[in-house]
Amino acid sequence: MPELPDVEGFRGVFAEHGAGRRIESVRVADAGVLRDVGARRLRATLTGRSFGEPERLGKWLIVPLSSDPVLLLHFGMTGSIVWADPRSRPHRHDRVTFGLGDGELRFRDMRKLRGIWLAPDRSAADRMLSGVGPDALTVTREEFGEIVGARRRLKATLMDQSALSGLGNLLTDEICWRARIDPRRRGDGLDHAETGRLYAAMRRVLRDAIPTGRVPGRRSWLTGRRDDTDPACPRCGTGLHHGRVGGRGTFWCPECQPAATG
């Protein structure tokens, strides 16, 4: 599932290949990814306009267009943005293609769980995103402490996009492991030092992951051990525990991450 580092990578693709470029064509191969806009209106609105500088909020990509409209993209579990040669064969999951002359930006998504929205202006786009929490990359230490401390379930809070945006299942497990905190803990049961460790771990994980454009599967990371037959902690070698926390499959080290106390 695309998380903050993936979407930051998609923002980079849009910035490099789309910002300032005139949209010469819009092809909709599957209108099933369009939300609150039809294929005809999307083509009519975008064709001839130019993409502005893209922004990101959590897992959302926000792309302003010349003269008011704003494109909003959410990648669900399997979405991505790909820059491609216009002569190359379309992928079977390319749902919408933006033609830019010498290349194409292709919205590719297998499962089509989220998709593309078109807001008439920035104010409307901001209203659409009003329920999205502060971005995990820019949230302050004080804001983070208030968010975590105000709720009971730690992992569920970190993954709740209305509380803190950008983190998914893989990043959340990685962050808790780095901070040596059991993901089953209650957020309102963490002390000041533990919350500080969690915040520092989040900043470090995001800083290391963003340049790769994904959540790395490095062997020194918890994410690099999840799929092993008998996964062991990269830090101490203890066998990892696996269960469901906040409704999601979760890995943690019983030695490095002391058992839940609240």
Image: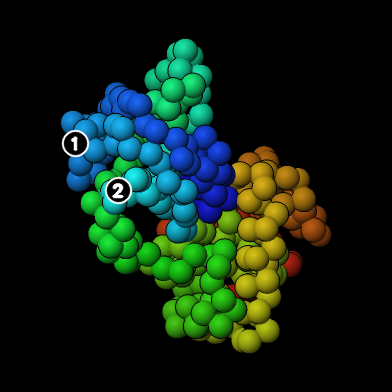
Quarter location, residue 127: bottom left
The answer to whether 210 appears left or right of 79 in the picture is: right
Residue positioned 66% across, 51% down in the render: 209
**Total count of labels:** 2
Q: How far apart are labels 1 and 2 at the CA level?
A: 16 Å
Q: Earlier in the sequence, mark 1 or mark 2?
A: 1
Circle 2 crowding by C-alpha within 10 Å: few under 14, some 14–19, many from 20: few
Instruction: Give the answer, above or below, for where 221 lies relative to 38.
Output: below
Q: Position of residue 181 (x, y in %)?
A: 65, 71
Q: Position of residue 110 (x, y in %)?
A: 39, 31
Q: Residue at x 48, y 23 (%)?
A: 103
Q: Residues within 10 Å of mark 1 (few under 14, many from 20)?
A: few
Q: Amino acid at mark 2?
A: Ser
163 relative to 223 in the view: left or right: left
| Residue designated by label 2 | 67
Q: On the image, numbered disc 1 is attached to which residue? A: 41
Taking the spot 77% from the left edge, 50% from the top edge, the residue there is 220
Q: 262 or 100, which is in the foreground?
A: 100
- Image coordinates of residue 218 in percent, x first then y, are 73, 45
Q: Secondary structure at mark 1?
A: helix
Whether residue 143 is visible to the viewer of this picture, yes or no, is yes
Can you see residue 252? no
Q: SS of the residue at dot 2?
A: loop
- In the figure, 187 relative to 126: above or below? below
